[in-house]
Amino acid sequence: MENLLGLLRVRVKRGVNLAVRDVRSSDPYVVVKMANQKLKTRVVKKDVNPEWNEDLTLSVADPNLPVKLIVYDHDLFSKDDPMGDAEFDVRPFVEALRMNLSGLPDGSIITKVQPSRSNCLAEESNVIWKNGQVVQDMCLRLRNVECGEVELQLQWINLPGSRGL
């Protein structure tokens, strides 16, 4: 517990234009990994534009580790098919959390993360001060697949007894 910085809430919002892995559609779900943690969303049947709106919570000890995300097509009688993967860096988000932001106007942009070859961002991602907390929305372009994006939102949960930021 003393090694823990806090909890990262990853809201998996939705998938956009995901790959077709069954006859005409797919049954996608998302697996989120960080260090030795692995969490997954529910399966959305027959939808290449699924709406999950699910919160997955990771405990963060080392903010230098990337968060990895893999989308799979659920199959009943065979191994689930991979539908692409992505990863993102939580450091810009954690750095924003470490700033003293009290008194900042609601909706203020703290930092902007640009898409680059070293990240999976499909578009600019802003870290924002919203309703008294730091929030980051991002759209990740999936790799190792013909098409697809996943939209996420990051939030932080401070834990009493943790090392904190």
Image (cartoon, rainbow, N blue to C red):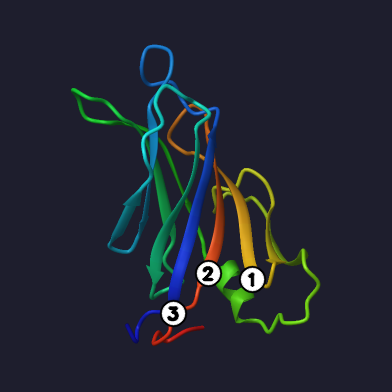
Q: CA distance from mark 2 to mark 3?
A: 10 Å
What's the residue at 27%, 31% (across, down)? 80
What's the residue at 41%, 61% (across, down)? 57
Q: CA distance from mark 2 to mark 1?
A: 8 Å
Q: Position of residue 5 (x, y in %)?
A: 43, 79
What's the residue at 47%, 38% (across, down)? 143
What's the residue at 81%, 72% (across, down)? 105
Q: Residues within 10 Å of mark 2 (few under 14, many from 20)?
A: many
Q: Are marks 2 and 1 in contact (CB under 8 Å)?
A: yes
Q: Is residue 45 left or right of residue 132?
A: left
Q: Position of residue 47 (x, y in %)?
A: 47, 24
41 or 114: nearer the viewer: 41
Pick the quarter of the image with the N terminus.
bottom left
Q: Residues within 10 Å of mark 1 (few under 14, many from 20)?
A: some
**Label 3: element kind:** loop
Which mark, residue 133? 1
Question: Upstream in the sequence, badge 3 or badge 1?
Answer: 1
Q: Is residue 134 left or right of residue 71?
A: right
Residue type marked 2: Trp
Q: Which residue is mark 2?
A: 156
146 in relation to 52, above or below: above
44 in relation to 132, above or below: above
Residue type marked 1: Gln
**Label 1: element kind:** strand
Q: Which residue is mark 3?
A: 159
Q: Residues within 10 Å of mark 3 (few under 14, many from 20)?
A: some
Going by the picture, which residue comes out furthest to the left? 77
Q: CA distance from mark 3 to mark 1?
A: 15 Å
Q: Position of residue 72 (x, y in %)?
A: 35, 35
Residue type marked 3: Leu
